[in-house]
Each structure stands twice: as structure tokens, then as C-alpha cells.
Image (tube, rainbow, N blue to C red):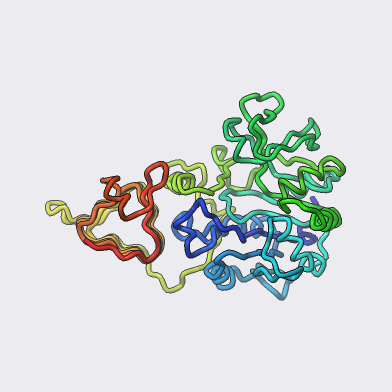
Amino acid sequence: MPSVHKTLAMILAGGEGRRLAPLTQERAKPAVPFGGRYRIIDYVLSNFANSGVLRMKVLTQYKSDSLNTHISRGWRLSNMLGQFVESVPAQQRTGPEWYRGSADAIYQNLNLVTDEEPDYVFVFGADHVYRMDMRQMLDFHVTSKADCTVAAIPMPIEQAASFGVVTADKDGVMTDFQEKPANPVPMIGNPGKILASMGNYLFTTESLVREIVRDAGKETAHDFGKSIISEMFKKAKVCVYDFAQNKVPGQLEREIGYWRDVGDLDTYYEANMGLVDVDPQLSLYNSSWPIYTAPNASAAPAKFVFNNVEGQRVGSATDSLASEGCIISGGKIHRCILSPNVRVNSYCDISDSILFEGVQVGRHARIRRAIIDKNVDIPPGIEIGYDPEQDRKRFFISPAGIVVVPKGMRLSD
């Protein structure tokens, strides 16, 4: 297997994430919490760290303060050994313009590549949730003698309009690329599915620099899918890596091939709720391939108090995740995900909901199918998720009916 020490990861984390609004009103999409105590970006960073790819540059742009803080305080590797996770804000090195696309983000930071002198460069997004052993993709890339390798995953053909659709021959060499096609080419031997690009790429360094510089001189979308891959496969060897074949240590059979693009509120909500299943497709408890995040050294253990059954004042949680610092004080939660330092007071009834850090829920409140953003105080007796008309007057409601209360919103009884 080729050495991971000759690799560099360029992680694209500058996306605005409009479809996740209002969760992205004050933070970048990769900084949005996922699974209680984690951020979305922790999943790709953990995959690289567990794979031994320990040189990572994170390219940021949109509302990046909380993302930069999370990386600088939580993701500290050994600089003495040449290991790093470094946040790189947009610097306008090539002119007075912000990133015009994913390819332009790399072009504006080509000095990072030339300074590190890697043999291979991973170019990955920061807003997907999955587990992946990057070494297996690297081994495939080197064995195939590819200039570029695109990670892809089988998806239902009905979802083709949301993805770049790739076609590969029996040896894994790309023969076609369609960007969000209305009439997609199905997978060979499986007419009900397409092979969807995950937006994750691996390049030999020479090929990356050549293609990025060439694209920069043209009038294009400066996007990896639309501009780079769609043209590169016609004149260079672009291979397709089947993510469904990737298996990490400690992973169960049902977890293989799990990948979610949590790009909109309903997908984000459903992916979070999947974590509390008895047998989830993505387990957070795989100690052989952990998901790392910034530690919260000051937070106390989660606490559940009161067992007054006759008075119905019972602190309980079922089918839920409760992070450190949470206090369930005489309230009931069911199928919920609580970020650190959430307090649920007596006689509350909360179900099928996600509560971000610092949320305080007053007595007798009832909440269901909701996402409550950071530092919101829920007044006593309030109901959220029970009356769509009333909710629509005050909150954002997703197409699937999920009520979203924005960060720091002040609520009245």
C-alpha cells in the first residue's frame, strides 16, 4: 500500500449552505452540529486522521469564525512530526475576488500544495457524513495509475438530478460524466441506479496543478464536477472508486456504504434521527474508527433527576443521545439528540427533536419534530410542533414539517 506520508488533504469548507438555513445564518455549513457533540466537519477530519493522512488544509470562507475556532482549539496534531490541521481563510491571492467555485478555491491556494510537495492530493468536501478509509482509495488510485480518482456511490436513479453521474468500464476507468442530468445513464447491470460522484477526489499532484491552472484561464464555472472532471476524463486517465467497497475497522455489515449529503434541513434531520435507532447505519460507538471532536473539559456528566412517578415528575430519556453537561430534571425526552449543556425542566415532553448547545426548556413545555438552535430559552408551557399554523407565524418550517428555531431567538410565552 502506498505511503500516506506523501499525501496532502485539501478540504473544501467554504460553502454557504443556504439550504440548511436558518442553521447557517451565523455559521458555515461544516460547523453545524451533528450527532450532539460533533460538527459536520469532524467526520471528514476523523476519516483522514484515522487513515493516517495527517496533513490537512481546511479552506474556509463563509461565516467561518466558529469553524476556525473549532479547528484551532480542538484539532491539534503534532507539529513536531509534521502533522497539522490548519484552517486557511480566503486570501484573494490571485486578485480581488472570493472563491468562484471549488476548483478556484484550490487554484487560489496552489501555494499550499507546492509548499508541502506531496505526491498525491486529496480534494474532499467538508459537509458529508460517513466513514471512509482513505488508504483504500489511495491504493486503488496508485494501482490504477490514474491521474485522478473520483469516489462514487450507487444511488437511486430518481435522485440523479442532485448529483454528478459517472460511468465507468469494467476496469474502473471513467467513460462518461453528466452533471445533474435529467436523463441519466444508469449503472451497468443495474438500470434502477446511477453511480453518483461524492464530490471527493484524489489527484496526482502534477495532474491537479495542470488541470487547475488550465481551468483558471478559461471562462468556466470553476467547479470540480462541471469544469474539471467533465473535461479531464476525455484526455487523461480518470478512475472511479466504488465507495460501497470501502470498509473501516470495527464497521458492521449494515454500515458499509453509509454516506449522507446533509445539504438540506430534512436530510439533515433524518440523518440525525437515524443515530438514535437501536441498530443505526452509522454507529457513533465504533472505538476502532472513532469520530473525534473538540473536547469539552469543563462539562460535567449528563444527569437525570427526579423519579416521582405518581406526580409524573420523572427525568427520563429513551432512544436518545444526551451529551455531556445535560440535565434532564423531571422532564421526558424520546428520540432526541441533545448537544452539551442542555437543560430540560420538570414536566416537559420532548420527542423527535434536536436541541443544540445551551438550550433551556421551561417547565411543562411540549416540543416535537423540531430543531432548536444554540442558546435558545424555551418559555414554560410553550408548544412547538403541534400547531403548524401557529408555528409558521414564528418559526421556519421545512418542507417535511420540521420546525426550526434559530440561534439565540427570544421567545415569549
Q: Which residue occupies the extreme left position in the image? A: 310
Front residue (pair 374, 78): 374
Question: For the image shown, how many numbered marks are present on the structure?
Answer: 0
* Left or right: 25 as drawn, with respect to 367: right
Can I make out residue 20 in this image?
yes
Can I make out residue 322 in this image?
no
Considering only vertical position in the picture, is 401 above or below 412?
above
Considering only vertical position in the picture, is 89 above or below 208?
below
* Left or right: 176 as drawn, with respect to 160: right
Q: Position of residue 336 (x, y in %)?
A: 36, 51
Q: Which residue occupies the extreme front position in the image? A: 219
Residue at image location 74% in from the left, 66% down from the top: 109
Front residue (pair 146, 247): 146
* Left or right: 350 as drawn, with respect to 23: left
Front residue (pair 397, 360): 397
Q: Position of residue 123 (x, y in %)?
A: 71, 55
Q: Position of residue 319 (x, y in %)?
A: 36, 47
* Left or right: 218 as drawn, with respect to 188: right
Front residue (pair 197, 180): 180
Residue at image location 56% in from the left, 67% down from the top: 64
Residue at image location 55% in from the left, 66% down from the top: 63
User: Where does the C terminus fall, quadrant-wise?
Assistant: bottom left
Q: Which residue occupies the extreme bottom position in the image? A: 80
Q: Position of residue 230 (x, y in %)?
A: 76, 43
